[in-house]
Amino acid sequence: MSHYVRYEKELNMTGISYPVQVNKIPKFENQNDISINVFGYENDEFFPIHISQQKDRDAFYNDLTKIHLADEDYEHAKMVWDTFEIEDMGSYHDLYLKSDVLLLNCVFERFRDQCMEIYGLDPAHFYTCPGLAWSAALKVAKCKLELITEDNAEAYLFIESGLRGGISQISNRLATANNEYLDNTYDSERDSSYLLYQDCNNLYDLALSMPLPTGEFKFLSEEERINFNVLDVGKCSDKGYVLEVDLDYPKELHDLHSDYPLAPETNRDHFLFDNTNAKKPGLFKDETGGVPIEKFVGLRSKMYSLTYGDVEQKRAKGIVKSVVRRELKHSNYVSCILDQKTLDANKI
């Protein structure tokens, strides 16, 4: 619609601005008695392109859904044919294509305007939306990322050892609550239990909205390690820490955390493991007597790499930190996915 501003006086555009946004199309159609074009084709072949007369309603029969074209849609197709003085199906095809392309053009141009207004970046200069989002994050946050090179390979391997990936699971097919506030199902002879439904979306954006490390990666000296106390590091500190700790999972927490342990881990078979060695003395031992392992719960003591915020969470839920093995310090905590107020304050 952005290319037909000259028709604004002939169209009812109340409450609609140019270019017309996609969510405004139904309103535009209702105010002007205009609808999207109807077009027919079958078996990947268009109707004979040079047929000069209008096609009757039966020609628009949908072989896929076995449904005839609605009367109002057919009347609309006839109206388009007459209004634009269509001479043949080729002209109808060209008009249909033009209206579709112009709509897509308006949507993209609107997207470009918004990105230019908020970020000062033109999407037409990017290959992908993730590339645009990455550049926008760096530009708005005004941060410079330090590349971890081979000179600091130990820091890279240290951080990589803490990667766990996303966790998504349903532990039970059926869970039944014993809710004391529901008289019709409550059993006073059993312990009370409750169900909490959580549908967590957009987890990656949530992670990116948290403080992120950007540079100055270095291991603490022996003296710094001795004097280090994770509880002294505030959440708003400009220095962050990745800790490698020896965690001890108290036995009293095993049942409580069996479905969703606070310290998940990635377990792999030893590179020398071979099923042919099962039950052979002196070689790898089959601990389950040939029964396939269906479940693993990581509740044993373990070495674990985590950020200081995770340490606070685990301490609050009863996990014991036995020994701090190593600490990697980094600076310039930034939030690269910002709220609207911050974006407005950084408009270019």
Image (cartoon, grey):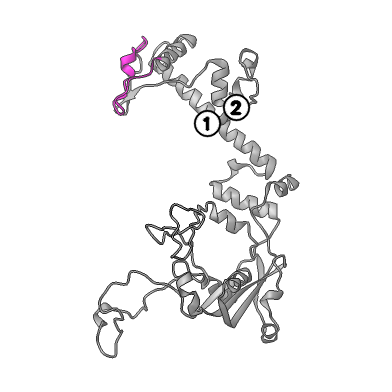
Q: In the image, which residues are magenta?
A: 51-71
| Residue at the image position 41 percent from the left and 62 percent from the top | 171
| Helix, strand or loop at mark 2 | loop
Q: Which of 113 and 321 is in front in this view?
A: 321
Q: Where is residue 7 in the image (x, y as percent from the top left)?
A: 62, 15
| Residue at the image position 33 percent from the left and 69 percent from the top | 294
Residue 48 visible somewhere in the drawing: no
Q: Position of residue 104 (x, y in %)?
A: 52, 31
Q: On the image, numbered disc 2 is attached to which residue?
A: 20
Q: Which residue reaches farthest right?
A: 345
Of mark 1 and mark 2, the one earlier in the sequence is 2
Q: Which amino acid does label 1 sit on?
A: Leu
Q: On the image, numbered disc 1 is attached to which residue?
A: 104
| Helix, strand or loop at mark 1 | helix
Residue 133 visible somewhere in the drawing: yes
Give the distance between the C-alpha atoms of the residues marked 1 and 2, in whole angstroms: 11 Å
**Is 344 placed left or right of 322 in the picture?**
right
